[in-house]
Structures are given as C-alpha cells and as structure tokens.
Amino acid sequence: MSELNRLTDVAQACETTLADGRRGFSGVIFAVSVKDVARHSLEPEELERRLLEIGFVEGARVEILHEGFLGRDPIVVRLDDTRVALRRREARAVIVRPDETR
Amino acid sequence: MIAEQTTLPNSDEAGTEPIRIALVGNPNCGKTAMFNALTGARQKVANYAGVTVERKEGRLTTAGGHTAIVLDLPGTYSLRARSPDEVVTRDAVLGRLTGETTPDVIVCVADATNLRLVLRLALELKAVGRPVVLALNMIDIAERQGRDIDVEGLAGDLGVPVVTTVATRRRGVEALAAAAIKAANDHATAPSNITGWAEPSAAELRRLHLTAERIFKKRVREARRPDTLTGRIDDVLLHPVAGIAILLIVLFAMFQAVFVVAKPFMDLITAAVTATSAGAAMILPDGLLKSLVCDGVIAGVGSVLVFLPQIMILFLFIILLEDVGYMARAAFLLDRVMGVAGLHGRAFIPLLSSFACAIPGVMSARVIDNRRDRLTTIMAAPLMTCSARIAVYTLIISAFIPDKRYFGVINLQGLVFFSLYAAGMIGALVVAWVMRRLIWRSASEPFLMELPAYKRPELVVVMRSVAQRGQIFLTRAGTTILFMMVLIWFVCTLPVAPPGATEPAINYSFAGMIGRAVGPFLAPIGFSWQMSVALIPGLAAREVAIGALGAIYAVSGGESGGHPLLAANLAHHWSTASALSFLAWYVFAPQCASTLAVVKRETGSWIWPVIMFSYMFALAYASAFVVYRIAVSAGLG
C-alpha cells in the first residue's frame, strides 16, 4: 500500500488533475485516485467505481470542452468518444498526463 | 467489500409460459424506441411494488407465432445499483424482485456509435448466467459516421449473439426478437452453469473494462466521419453567455406554455364540469344527494381533470428536451446555481413547474435519479408560488394594500405581490438547503452525467410518453385527490344547517366546528374564527378559500364575480395586520390536499406528506405570527 502511495505521490509531482485544467486542456488519464477528493463527496471507493463506470479509466483520452459560467464549474469533458459533465470536486480524482503541445 | 452471492432460480416452465425478455442498456441508447418497436402499442405502465420506479411491460408476437413478454428496465451503466431505478434493473436481471419472474433472456441495447461502456455492461450481464443478446442499435448513424463494426467478430469475442438494429425505423427488430427467443429456448433445453453475481470492486471494474476495451479496439474501427454537429451545437448551447440566454428563453417558453397554452383547455374543462354539475342539479331533487353529486363528486372529478392540461404540456416539454439531448445540458448550466441550495442541476424543472402548480412539479421530480435529491426537491417544490395562490393574493392585496406609487415606478401593491413570490422562492431554497446540508449532510451526490449526442425526437415515441404520463396522473394521483375532495365536501357540508338558520350553512358543519375549535389556536396570528373556517374548504384548492370567505361573509356570487364587494367586506371585517398575516400564512401553509396526495403517490408512503404538512404548517404559523406582531406594533392592528 505504501508502495502504491509513494508511486501516486511521484506521479502527482509531474502529472496534474483534471480539476486543474482549463478549457482546451487535453491529455491521457494516468490514474484514477480518490485519496485527495474532498470529504463531502461520496465514499472514496464508491466515487472511484462511478468514475470508472462512466469511462474515466487509465489510458482514456480527455479534453475539457466547456466550463460553467460560475467559477468555471462544472466542466464538460470529451472522454474518448463520449462527452461527460462533472464538477471539479470529483475531477480531482482524475490524474492526467497532459499532451506535449501544451 | 461484501460479496452478495445468489443462485438464480431455474425456470422449468419456459416451454409453456411466454418467454420473458428484459431490455437493459446505458441511458440514451434508444432503449425506449426499441421497446416501442418490439411491442408496438401493446404496453402496460405500472409501478414496481413499494418503489416509485416505473414498470413498463409489453407483448410481442413474432412472424413465427411466438409470443414473448418484454420488460423495459431503467437505463444503467452497471448492475451495481446506485439509484432506485438501477436497483430495479439489477434485481429484475438477477431475479430477486418479489412478484417478478426472472427473465429468460436479457437483451442488451447498445448505441452503436458509443460502444465502449456498454461492452463492459454486456460482459457483466453475461456473467450473471442468463442468455444475453446484444442489439447494436442506431447502426445507421454508426455507418454514416464510417465506424465499421465487425459484428461476427464481436459476437465471437463476447460469446453472445449480436444483431444490428435501427429501432426508430424498425430495422432488424424482427431479427432481434427471433434471436432473443432462440437464445432463451437454447438455454432452456441445455441450461448452462448458472453463476452468481457479486458487486464488482474497483479492481474488477478495471479488469472488465480492459477486456471490453481490447474487444472494442479489435472489432470497432474509429469513426472516419465523426459526429461534429453535436460539438458545434454545444459550442453555442453551452457558451457561458449565449448558452444561459438560450436556456432562459427555453425555460420562459416552457413556463409560458404551462401557464398560457393550458389556460383555454383548463377553462374548457371547468366549463364542462360546471355544465355537468348544472345538468345533474336539474335532475336530482334538492338535498344531500344533490350536494354530494354536484359539489362532492363532480367538483372532485373536475378538480383532478383541471390539472391534466398543465401536466401534459409540461411533460411534452420535459420529454422533448430529454429526447433531443438538451436536458443534460440544462442541468449542466444550472448545476452551480442549484448547488448553492444543495440541489442537483436537474432540480430546476420541478421547481420551475411548481410556479404553475406543485402537482406537475412534484411529478416531474422523477427527472432526478438520486432518491435524496428527489425527495429534497419534492419537499421544497410546494413553496414556489403556484397559480392558485395568485387569486388569494390579488384579493387580499386589493382589499388592504393602498394603490400607492413610490418614485413614480414602484407600485406598493406590486411590491407586496413580488415580496410574496420572493418569500416562497427563498423559502424553497432554504428548506432544500436545510434538508441537504444539515439533515443529509453525509452523502452529497456527485454531478456526473453523460451528455448524449443531439438527436431528432421521434414524434410517436414522444406522444406515447406524454399520453402515458397523463394516464398515470389520472389513475394514480387522481383517485387519491378525488377521495380527498369528497372528504372535504363531507366536512364542509355535514351536519346540515338547522331550519331557519341565520348564519351561513358552513358555520354549522364539521368545518365550522373545527374552525371555531382551532380559533383560539390561530388567534395569536390574528385570525378570526371565520378565517379559520375558510381555511378548511381551502384545503381542496387554495382559491376555494375565496368562495368560502364569500359564503361566510354572506356575499352573493361568492366566487369570482363578487371580488370588489368581497374585498370591501374583508376590509371592513379584518384589520390590516390580520390580512398581512393571512398572506404570510398563504405563502407557506400546506393549503392543498391534492399536492399532499401526489407527494404520497410519488414517494410511495404517507411519511413524506406528513413531514411536508408539518414543516409547512410550522413555517406558516411562525411567519404569520411574526408578520402579525410586527404589523400590530406598527399600528396596523
């Protein structure tokens, strides 16, 4: 477990979360990790499974297409072939390796 | 994680009984269109016992003369249930639903343009051990996008028969039915090993997803001409400025239609009910029976029917917006605003509809998947100022508020009217906030929603859904409302006034007795006992209180005709403080038996209407008390 935590920590040093992206941000999902998500969301395991079920899986391509007008929240993300809306609070769990072009 | 192991019962009677087909699929995969294509008009809509999830069943007969029963299950991404709808889907598939026979075959309906997620669902369904058939629906759109799918290879990899279909044009539907029946029969003659189903962990989900992804990569070619239209429409509709403006226009049009377009139909129904009542009055001899038939039953039926136009128009909008794909966008645009009160983005529809009438508002809370969010919205909806309150507000304001202008533009009467609306709205948001943030603090539902590609709605499908909505209202909510109307008639009519009575008849009835009895309790908020009596028939519908006030203060032509006279009368009998208190009371009071009946129907228990009645009563009493005391101390008593 500590090994996994260490790996995630290393990953987070160079990766960014989907929650920090702005419109036009794109990349590939590197990990789905719920450990930093605000506590008033769901149980971490439940949130992780919901994200997986709707397609936030390691290796999937993401791009932020739209942002809400208040606080740029929620966001609409292109996720492979689908479009998914979510709040930034939950998007914190999606760790992304940004594309080179940015 | 606790694994739930169940063994599925073996259906030995598959040979004699009609085969049972269950339709399962992601949301927006065209499942409803498929259900319509399979069963035509032979559908039955009901509720599952104990839950407010709709149960849709239909019959189909194949060219070969086979009969099958098709069950349309709520859309889901996995068998791991998260909402009451998804619990039904899971339990129906697993054969755990009481009073339901386990389906003989599961038809997994897939949007052929969006296969990634549904392939994982198909694998999950297959693991249950029932025969599965995969329908690649909307294959025409996939072909147009140049998305080649190796159907045979897909069937081989998944290990289930795959049929391509276009449900809206009935293409491939016969073949799908035949494949489903064949799969069910093959399974019945040679039952394979029936495994159990356990809720998958995150790791298992990843593994299933990897398998699905491998199959997807191998058998589905990336679209050569991907759908760019949806993206281009979204650029406008989800634009921070233009998107909001368009949303407001759409909502305004919807609100106007519910209000304005429904009006002539409602007037027509009212006229028909009045005519029927007059006809019955001519035939029947004077007395209790005549009163029961005319004022109780016919007026009761009328009070149910009169809501029908608003409900049908509202649901026409909701179903159209849902089918086009706009509903998810509207929820996205409004999520942050509704989130302030702890509500889901979709709660705007029930709350907005409640401006017309809380009944369609409460019914439309079905657009919210999560049970707690749905209940919060239902509880807050009746505080939005409905059209029935307008009649009462207008009467009291015209009687007590001087028609003064300030700064040339602000009319005092208008200002009071606006304040009453604002009080209702703020009240609704505060109630929602308290429920969501203080009572159900633990689990805030994430806003996580697929935005479907825009589609042209199918007129037949839309019309059928709207008709079903009307039918559900009439059969389910209607019966309870009718019962309550007759009960209120009973309370307001019996016992009858003695011969030579000097006071209005209602004063001698149970309502009169109750009014006098609760009089002392309502005295602190400035209500006379006559006002208390008027509140009781007002439970039938808020505006009925006007007629009751007219009767009590012996104004002829009590209903709408006598307004100026009644206003003058009220101004004579009531103090301004009492009138303001009455207005404050009307903003919050649970003055509508029909709403409570609908809440009972929609929540499936009496607990929620009781809670609603109690909190609204407390809120009404408290605000009327405060308003009355302030008004008295300001010298208006």
Image: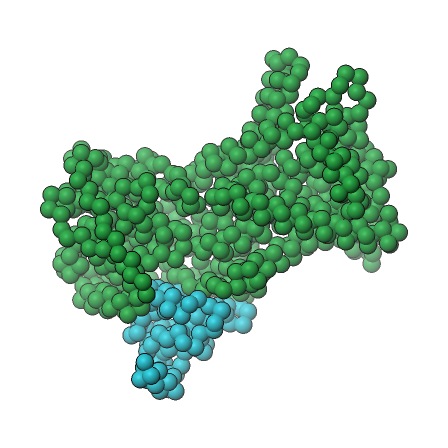
Chain colours: A cyan, B green
Q: Is residue B236 visible?
A: no
Residue at the right extreme? Answer: B635
Please name the residue shown 36% across and 53% down the image: B86
Task: Find residue B120 and report its horizontal and vertical position in percent.
Answer: 26, 61
Task: Find residue B251 and report its horizontal and vertical position in percent.
Answer: 55, 53
Q: Is residue B507 visible?
A: yes
Please name the residue shown 85% across and 43% down the image: B575
Please name the residue shown 77% across and 16% down the image: B499
Residue B528 location, quadrant: top right
Left or right of B629, for residue A85:
left
Residue B216 location, quadrant: bottom left
Task: Find residue B420 and report its horizontal and vertical position in percent.
Answer: 71, 51
Residue at the left extreme? Answer: B190
Total numbered labels = 0
Q: Is residue B609 above or below residue B337?
A: above
The residue nearer to you, when weighing B322 against B608, is B608
Left or right of A52, for residue B386:
right
Q: Is residue B179 above or below residue B559?
A: below
Task: Find residue B157 and report its horizontal and vertical position in percent.
Answer: 15, 61
Please name the residue shown 30% across and 48% down the image: B96
Quadrant of the drawing holding the N terminus of chain B: bottom left
Left or right of B390, for residue B9:
left
The residue nearer to you, when weighing B463 against A34, is A34
